[in-house]
Image (tube, grey):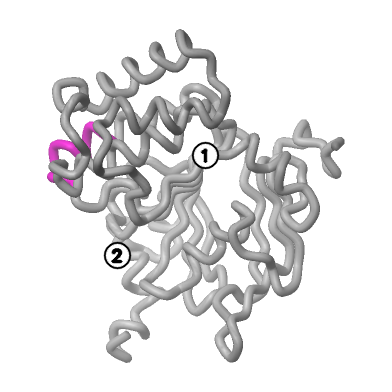
Amino acid sequence: MQAISDPEDGSAISIKDLVKRFEDITAVDGVNLEIKQGELFGLLGPNGAGKTTTINVLCGILKPTKGTAIVGGYDVRKNLKEIKALIGVCPQEAAVFKFLNARENIELFGSLHAIPKKELKERTDTFLESLDLTEASKRKAKGYSGGMLRKLNLIIALISDPKIAFLDEPTVGMDPRARRATWKFIGSLKDQGKTIILTTHYIEEAEALSDRVGIIDYGKLIELGTPKELMKKHKAKNLEEVFLKITGRRILEGI
């Protein structure tokens, strides 16, 4: 199946007038967005703003109600098989088998992608070392802390060497030291030319890592730009201040 749009145009993801409704709730409301190849894009918003729903549409978990979404040149409505071969997804909830150890989990998911055994072992060793899980890799995952489970989840999402990675709250539950180490690891993915879509409630994380950020609220994309551009536009000292200024009505409403 040939891509319907040429990824050589520089776009990894193209979203046009995207709408996703659930009965009487519009979770995504007319979003338009282009994410460039090799870009680390931060998608920010309050709880229930539409971030995860947008990602789930792009990954093919949910069907859009209206509009188009093109991932790696393929339409999410028609070419899910091709899209799934291009992407890796780190969901909010840890998707691991807790009766297996870290290495067994990684190698199980890697085998589903038909990665040759030698290559899979090499990738597994590299990821475990990069995220400081080597020592714990022989322990069953049921004894892992929340932060360790997030690291394992991240490795599983990336073991297939995807061109596009969706990282939904990848550092939740990590202590500050582990979070910083994970930031470095995520930054290294961009150095490899991967396109990364990051959602996070740690606004300093998005500021430190993202080439650009989009802020979504009530299903609408209400701001887009580099962290520096948005700080300058809103006369803010950091991205968190920008975020609070433009999504403040949720706080006032107690949502």
Give the image location of residue 106, x and y in percent: 37, 29
Number of labelled discs?
2
Callout 2 secondary element: helix
- For label 1, the residue is 88
What quarter of the picture does the N terminus occupy? top right
Of residues 89 and 46, the one nearer the viewer is: 89
Q: Give yes or no for residue 177 being in the magenta stretch.
A: yes
Q: Give yes or no for residue 241 being in the magenta stretch.
A: no
Of residues 29 and 215, the one nearer the viewer is: 29
Q: Main secondary structure of the magenta part?
A: helix
Looking at the image, which residue is at 76% across and 35% down?
Answer: 7
Q: Is residue 73 above or below residue 248?
A: above
Image position of 46 (left or right of 224): left
Q: Earlier in the sequence, mark 2 or mark 1?
A: 1
Give the quarter of the image for residue 201: bottom left
Give the image location of residue 123, x and y in percent: 41, 17
Which stretch appears magenta? 174-182
- For label 2, the residue is 241
Looking at the image, which residue is at 39% across and 14% down?
Answer: 121
Give the image location of residue 69, x and y in percent: 71, 57
